[in-house]
Image: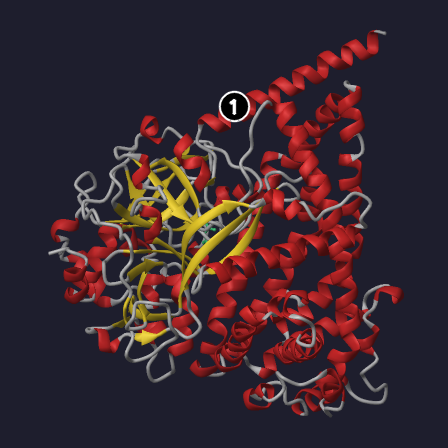
Amino acid sequence: MRKPAFRQVFSLLIAMAVILNLTTIVAADEGMWPLSEIPKLNLQEKGLRIDPSLIYDPAKRSLLYAVVQIGATGSFISEEGLIITNHHVAFGSVQAVSTPERDYLKNGFLAKSRAEEIPAPGRTARITESFQDVSAEVLSVAKKNMSYVDRTRAIEKKIKKIVAEAEKANPGKRAEVAEMFPGKTYWLFLYTVLRDIRLVYVPPLAIGNFGGEEDNWMWPRHTGDFALMRAYVGPDGSPAEYNEKNVPFKPKTYLKINPLGTEKGDFVFLLGYPGRTYRHLPASYIAYEQNIRMPAVADWYEWQIKLMEEMSQTSREVALKHDSRIKGLANTMKNYRGKLAGLKRLNYLEQKRQEERALQEFIQADPKRQAAYDQVLARLDKIYDDMGSEFPRIFILDNLRRSVTPLQIALTVVEASIERQKPDLERNAAYMDRNFNRLKQRIGLTLSSSFYLPTDMAIFKELMKRSLALDENQRIKELNRLVMPDKNLDDWLVEFFNSTKMADPEFVKSLWDKKPDEIKKIEDPMIKLALALYPEYKKIEETNRARKGQLDELQAKLVDVRQEFLGQQFIPDANGTLRLTYGRVEGYEPRDAVYYKPFTTVQGIVEKTTGQEPFNTPAALLQLINQRKFGRYVNPSLDQVSVCLLYSTDTTGGNSGSPIINARGELVGVNFDRAWEATINDFTWNHRFSRSIGVDIRYVLWILKEFAGANNILEEIGIK
Ligand code: ASP
């Protein structure tokens, strides 16, 4: 008798501790709030000085319509469709239009007139127009007694139907159903998609990427991470592909710039498109990430970066092919290392496990709860354990498809031939009519801007070696079977890669409409390999569907019971849909006795400059700093131009380019990163260490005025 009573008190204590902990977090402004929550946030109490309906009200020209998804995030800053985002968001487009002779990536670019603006191939900008809860409709097709695979399939199909109907009812708009709480809530979003986007201003790499990977995810920061683009539409005002006759898009609203910037302590908020967070997932998921997936991916990316850096030594032309790839890999690698360090520092896995032990006791303390939730955690554990054991093999297959371009193309061609035979709604999403052109375009762009055969060949070789190192029954036989025992592996590879036509854009184009039988007849070794591997990928897809069916059920229950246990209403994890987050301009203490101030200044640029990449400041900029040609852009409390700032918002990948907006709804900076300690935001947010990093609008304006001489732009945005 005594033991259970003791246990109950103990679990109550833990529950209270957890609740208290959570309460402090909530008071400290955690949250990537979906649109529906904005009216409930009492933002005026937090410091907002405008009516919250000016931020979001479907009936008004609210600020929301000034924000676009453009890879990550951007916002309109003029009535002529001018968009401000990050240099690193525009990076891929700048690379794609750069050549060794016209190296915009290195030297920057300014269009002095509209006619000089450069089309950014494949780039789109999406505006969220409306959303609607369609949960009941989506879930109506999930019947009891369905297998998990069937359940997932039924939901997938229903979603496609809802999307098709919405697009039919709203010609010209793009519809998407987003899963808000997996297995529980689904929202239908309508978007306007602008498809003619052009580059207007890009600072030189030594400003836009100052500090490079060394400073990435770090404070103090001095990166001028901003770029300007413009959205165009057809002469009739509707979205259109690039055409000379197109005209600048007129947004419903745009952000006014406050050239005075912001100060320490000020209330700020961000609107943006955060990608993914994982705050409602169980400890077993964290264990999978911490012990298996993230370390393996970080090591693998490090290996690839080294390879690509070596290849890049060949020439500037070859380097240009790798710049964007390296940047992406390095960004994720360092982010994962930061997260791993953060998980360890907080002992987060153990915290989660402790919470779950208390949660399990809470479940067992009540027969009704027990009936509903008893096995939820145990079953989730099993799924993530299984994923852990399958990981090494899946990882190789995944990366073969992701990182070896000719194989990626061959697999896509094979899959297209099969999927395109099916009725539209039954195809995998990428092969539906509404998506297929984009897929083809993306592949064409990869081939023209970032494919370099020797690199992909080396990656392929490494993955083959890794496959051979797996336990015999795990090896990817279709891959290793290819190599002739009597041939030197390197000779074989050269022959193999030289005899495929999967990197020939014209040949690839000729394959998109082929039927499966025709594909089988093609004499191309990469197609043959893709045909042999394809069933493996299909198997994975089916396993993932079954798993998703289970996860939907279990995660939905976990959210329900945790909300009951903690006495809290959660908001959905980030999922690439529009969110608001708010906080204050403030520094933080990363470790004992260290305080990080919330602003850096141009003086810090001088201090960091070595003349070597990534600290090779342009001489003209150094001169401006040394001569103190600051004009009106000086930050009065620092007597310098401030470069970057810190603030306590809740952000993640995808929030890059989000406008930093002050209490009056004016633009005071552009978000581009998080501090090292905040890389862990994807799992947990904490006011003590979660700081986002942005570029100060005063630095942006100062660069435009004094460094770039972009008076045409300043005039357009109303800055004299
Ligand atoms: N640098 C990130 C991005 O690219 C922003 C972040 O993760 O905080 O979206």
Looking at the image, is 306 positioned above or below residue 641?
Answer: below
Q: Nearer the viewer, residue 527 or 674?
A: 527
Type of amino acid under label 1: Thr
Can residue 479 be seen by looking at this rendering? no
The x and y percentages for residue 615 are: 35, 62
Q: Which residue is mark 1?
A: 23
- Which residue is at 26% across, 46% downward? 668
Q: Quadrant of the N terminus?
A: top right
- Which residue is at 47% across, 71% downward? 323
The x and y percentages for residue 533 are: 77, 74
- In this rendering, the count of numbered labels is 1
Dot 1 falls on a residue whose secondary structure is helix
Judged left or right of residue 677, residue 139 is right
Looking at the image, is 61 positioned above or below residue 329?
Answer: above
Can residue 467 be seen by looking at this rendering? yes
Judged left or right of residue 675, residue 638 is left
